[in-house]
Image: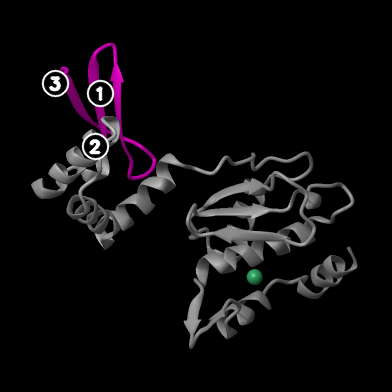
Amino acid sequence: MPPLSVEFFAFANVNNTIRLREGQLRVRLSDLLEGAPETVLYAIAHILLAKIYRKPIERGHAARYRKYVHSHEIRNKAHLVRQVRGRKRMASARGRHYDLEEIFEDLNLRFFGGMQARPQMSWSQGRARNLLGHYDPAHNAIVISRIFDHSAIPRYAVEYIVYHEMLHLRHPVKLNGSRRCVHSPEFKAEEKLFPRLEAAQRFLRRL
Ligand SMILES: [Zn+2]
């Protein structure tokens, strides 16, 4: 048996690795498994050693490990960790013509008394035409299609798109039977408070 080092490591996901380097076995366990019951840690040790020595993995150990990782607690933890460690690569909020953070704060003051916490704001990487913008709850981010960062686009149209996404933040998607109700009646009522709603929608339809 070569000398062995084991450490918990902050992978972006539940992940465990084993390597044989310069006569030393190095094991890294996902720090999401800290506090796992001893039977689970035993199962992981068995699986990793079986892998590196190309031996069959005992079914009972494999099942015990899978069951633990797929249990709710670990999955939720992994989801949180992905948000923090696996941050989507975000483009900047400041475009050539419009600064989305500035627009957000302006709308925030005008419509929400400055009480809306600002999510990550960014222009999309590509120039998708089919998607004006979207709110991504997993990353708490509002992404606006870059085609609107242009001198030919009036500010009220950009404001309207950002305002619409801010409403998505305020009105999380509710399950209505089996159908996702994305724009609830409350959502639509609040959207009507935008002063140049019709002009903005007309402008966007013409694009
Ligand atoms: Zn919408």
Look at mark 1 in the image and give the residue it sits on.
26
Sequence order check, earlier mark of 2 and 1: 1
- Left or right side of 207 for 10: left
For ligand 1, which image quadrant applies?
A: bottom right
Look at mark 2 in the image and give the residue it sits on.
50
- The single residue placed furthest to the top in the displayed view is 22
Dividing the picture into quadrants, the one containing residue 3 is top left
Density class for disc 3 (Cα within 10 Å; few <14, some 14-19, many ≥20) is: few
Q: Is residue 161 magenta?
A: no
Q: Secondary structure at mark 2?
A: helix
In the depicted structure, whether residue 206 falls above or below residue 2: below
- In this view, the residue in front, 172 or 26, is 26
- In this view, the residue in front, 11 or 41, is 41
Pointers 2 and 3 in contact (CB under 8 A)? no
x and y, in percent, of residue 183 in the image: 61, 78
Dividing the picture into quadrants, the one containing residue 2 is top left
